[in-house]
Amino acid sequence: MSDIDEPTPTGPPSNKALGDSLKAQGNEAYKKRDFEAAEKLYEQAWDANHDVVYLNNLSAVYFEKGDYEKTIKTCQRAIDEGREVRADFKVIAKAYARQGSAYLKLDDYENGTNALNKSLTEHRTPDTLAKLKEAQISKAEKERLAYIDPAKADEARELGNVAFKSGDFATAVGHYSESIKRNPADARGYTNRSAALTKLMALPDALKDADKAIEVQPDFVKGYIRKSHVLFAMKEFGKAMSAIEQAAEKDTAQKHTSEITSQLRKVSMADNESRAGESDEQAYARAMRDPEIQQIMSDPVFQGILQQAQNEPASLQQHMKNPEIRAKIEKLARAGIIKTR
C-alpha cells in the first residue's frame, strides 16, 4: 500500500532479517485493515531492528485507527531516530507529511502546515504540496469565519461614519474594511466604503464595492444608488442612468424616492449636456466604445429586431414587451443609437 514502506537500512541492524519478516507480516495485516495485528507486528519489527521505516508504518496504523496524538508522537520519534542515523531524506519527509496530516485532523492548522512545509523541504512531492495548499486554504477560511462578529462590524462601521463626516476618508476606508471583515454579508459596509473611495477618486475600487453590495444583497436599494453615483463620477452617464433606474425598480417600498429622483435628474442633465451638438455619427461612435453596447449590437437576434423595426417601427413596441429585449432597447436609446418615439 502507498502508506507503508519497504525497509531502509538506517544503522547497524540487530536482527534485520527478523525485522523485515515481521514488517512484511505487518504489511499484510495492514492491507486487510487488521490494525491491531499490524500495530503489534510493527512494534516487534522495531524491537528486532531499529529501522525508521517500521516507525513510519506504525504511525500509519495509528492514523488509520484515528489516534492522531499517537500518530504525531510516533512520527516525531521516527524523525528524531532518523536524524540520529542519517536516514534517507524521503523517509523523514514521509514522517513529517503524516505528522502534518494528523495535526490537520485535530484542526491544528499551525503545526499541520509547519510539518507539511518541513516535509517539502526534505523531499518535494505533488501529494504533500497539494495537502499544504488545501490546508492553507482551510486555515484562512477558518480564521475568516472565526473573525466574523456582526456587533463589532456595526461598531467599525460607525467609526467609519464618524471619520467620513469629518472628511477623513482614508481612515473611513480602514474602518469600513474592518466592518466588512467582521460581517461580509452586510451590504452596508461595501456601499459605505464605496462612498469613501469615491471621495478619494479611487473609482474602479468604488465600483467594485458597489457591485459587491448588490451581489451580497440584490434587493439593497442603496447598492444601486451608490453604483449610479460612482458611474456618474466616472462620467459613464448611460450606465449611471441604468443603475439608478434599477434602484427605482428595487425601491418597492418607496423609501428612497427623493434620492432616486434627484439622481435621475442629475444624471439626465449631465447626459444631455455631454451630447449637446453631437451628430448621429458621433453618438454612434461614442456608444460603441461601451462593451455592453458592442455585445448587444453584435447579437444576430437583436440585429434582426432592429432591421424589422426599420421597416415596421411599430414592431419595436411589441418587442419591448419582452423584459430582456426592453432593457437592451432602452440602453441603446439612452446611448442615442435608436429612438423609441
Image (cartoon, helix red, strand yellow):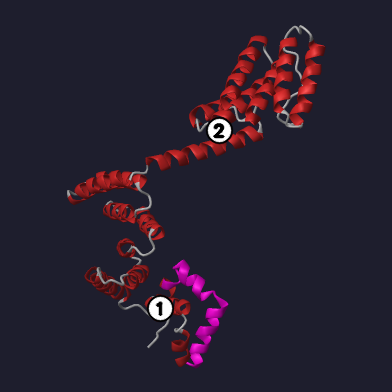
* Image spot of residue 269 (x, y percent): 26, 74
Number of marks present in the image shown: 2
Q: Quadrant of residue 51?
A: top right
As shown in the figure, which amino acid type bears the numbered disc 1? Glu
Q: Quadrant of residue 230?
A: bottom left
Mark linked to residue 330: 1
- The span picked out in magenta is 287-313
- Check the picture and name the quadrant holding the N terminus: top right
* Image spot of residue 72 (x, y percent): 58, 23
Q: Which residue sits at x=36%, y=57%?
A: 213
Secondary structure beneath dot 1 equals: helix
Marks 2/1 in contact by CB < 8 Å: the verdict is no
Up/down of 239 relative to 311, above or below: above
Q: Is residue 313 visible?
A: no
Q: Name the residue nearer the viewer: 146 or 35.
A: 35
As shown in the figure, which amino acid type bears the numbered disc 2? Lys
